[in-house]
Amino acid sequence: MLEDLTHRLEAVFKKLRGYGKLTEENIADSLKEVRRALLEADVNYKVVKDFIDSVQNKAVGEEVFRSVTPGQLIVKIVHDELVRLLGSTSTQIKTAGIPPTIIMLTGLQGSGKTTFAGKLAAYLRKRGRKPMLVAADVYRPAAIQQLKVLGKSLDVPVYDEGLGAPENICFNAIGAARSQMCDTIILDTAGRLHIDDNMMSELTRVKNRLRPHEILFVADGMTGQDAVNTAREFAERLDFDGVVLTKMDGDARGGAALSIRAVTGKPIKFMGIGEKLDEIEQFHPDRLASRILGMGDVVTLVEKAQETMDKEKAARLEQKFKKAEFDLEDFLDQIQQIKKMGSLESLIRMIPGIGRQLNDVQVDERNFVRVEAIINSMTREERRNPNLLNGNRRKRIANGSGTRVQDVNQLMNQFAQMKKMMKKFKGKSMRRAGSLPFGLS
């Protein structure tokens, strides 16, 4: 996510750390590099100008405290300005006093509205709500079927009438939601390849008839300034409530994320960070600013852990850890829970100080698969008592898991090292002894 911009900014700050103090000259030189980095990331040029002017005004003449280096101080100023640029605070979606809450999704064709509708349904259901998806895109081939497939995979009801007037379909969905005790309906409206009067008139009719509690503009994070320009026109003609940025996990320059809030005046509410239906995050300006500056995002990491980790299992695991009784069954369970949190590389990059060291390191996710295969090829008795694994058993396990005996030996050697480490921390909290899973770093 915005890795090119992160690398460029880190190079600027590294140069600044070599200065003894901040001067107008070295600040100006550094901000030229920051300006270039932002423009190459496809940030709107007017937004860049305002951003640089604001940073420069705050940096020039700023006293450098003894405990703060010039590099640290400028990073602090840039971070604060990024947070301001992105919206300062996170914004929740509105809910109705009397259900159902009506959420209307808008945007151009191909921006990811239908997929986001499914992600939003999964996100809301995880938080105790009962959503219904509404198929209001009657123009795009297979749009209705795509929404039905998403609904079936999520076990979320989908309301559709086939072809018809979208405003009538959306209005009738309200009654269907009430009869099925659904407290939220998500309207998947039609998009076009470009903005036209017919599309905007249709969206206006839906808005006027249903009066949605929340209208979200879905923008493709890979389209740069095109997304910003489209958002500006939608804001003028439809006056939506918030923005959703999709495909933020791609290798695009990502300048839309830094421009769209400033240009439209509308808050960013969600980000799509992957293809899976659970890969969606509420937008937090301070957290994204920290990620852009290579400072990690430990708050999001903790939230992901809380969402996926079973508290009872975690308590039992801590007791085993304290007693140095951690076995391969426990480790297999930990792997499966970590996989639910997302890719290992994305999780590691959220750890402050780690992401910067892994710029050129590729984390091999296949290690998860290999370790799982090896452990699953063991009997329950072998997983609980690895000392039973003699040469013949290890050969059988390697054959059963499609790996080599050397791979099994390597896993068991790493497991033995971890057991030694656990004995050193015996009686202490897991929080003080925590580390990356062995064999996966």
Image (spheres, helix red, strand yellow):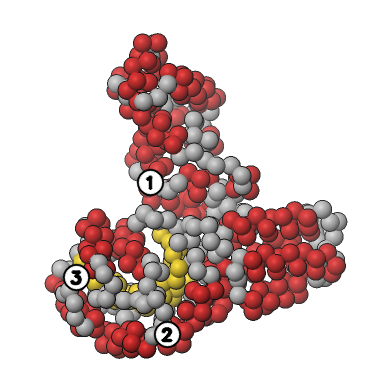
Q: Residue 219's spot in the image, x, y percent? A: 44, 71
Q: Is 359 left, or right, of 366 in this rendering?
A: right
Badge 3 element: strand
Label 1 to label 2, Cα distance in Å? 37 Å
Query: Quick check: 175 left or right of 44?
Result: left
Image x and y of residue 280, in percent: 41, 59
**Of pointers 3 and 1, the one earlier in the residue sequence:** 3
Q: What residue type is labelled 3?
A: Tyr
Q: Is mark 2 on a helix, strand or loop?
A: loop
- How many circles with numbers are drawn on the protein? 3
- Residue at the location (75% across, 68% down)? 32
Q: How far apart are marks 3 and 1 (CA)?
A: 29 Å
Helix or strand or loop: what does disc 1 sit on? helix
Q: Can residue 340 be seen in this view?
A: yes
Q: Which of 10 and 251 is in front in this view?
A: 251
Residue 23, horizontal then vertical, whole percent: 85, 66
Given residues 43 and 216, the one toward you in this image is 43
The residue lying toward the viewer, choosing from 25 and 220, is: 220
Q: Name the residue under label 2.
A: 239
**What is the x, y in percent for residue 169?**
20, 79
Q: What residue type is labelled 1?
A: Lys
Q: Do the residues labelled 3 and 2 touch (CB within 8 Å)?
A: no
Task: Estimate how packed mark 1 is, as few (under 14), some (14 to 19) or many (20 or more) residues with alpha carbons within 10 Å.
Answer: some
> Where 375 sits versus 392, above or below?
below
Sequence-first disc among 3 and 2: 3
Label placed on residue 340? 1
Disc 1 and disc 2 in contact, CB within 8 angstroms: no
Q: Residues within 10 Å of mark 2 (few under 14, many from 20)?
A: some
Give the amino acid at mark 2: Asp
Question: In the drawing, what numbered circle is on residue 159?
Answer: 3
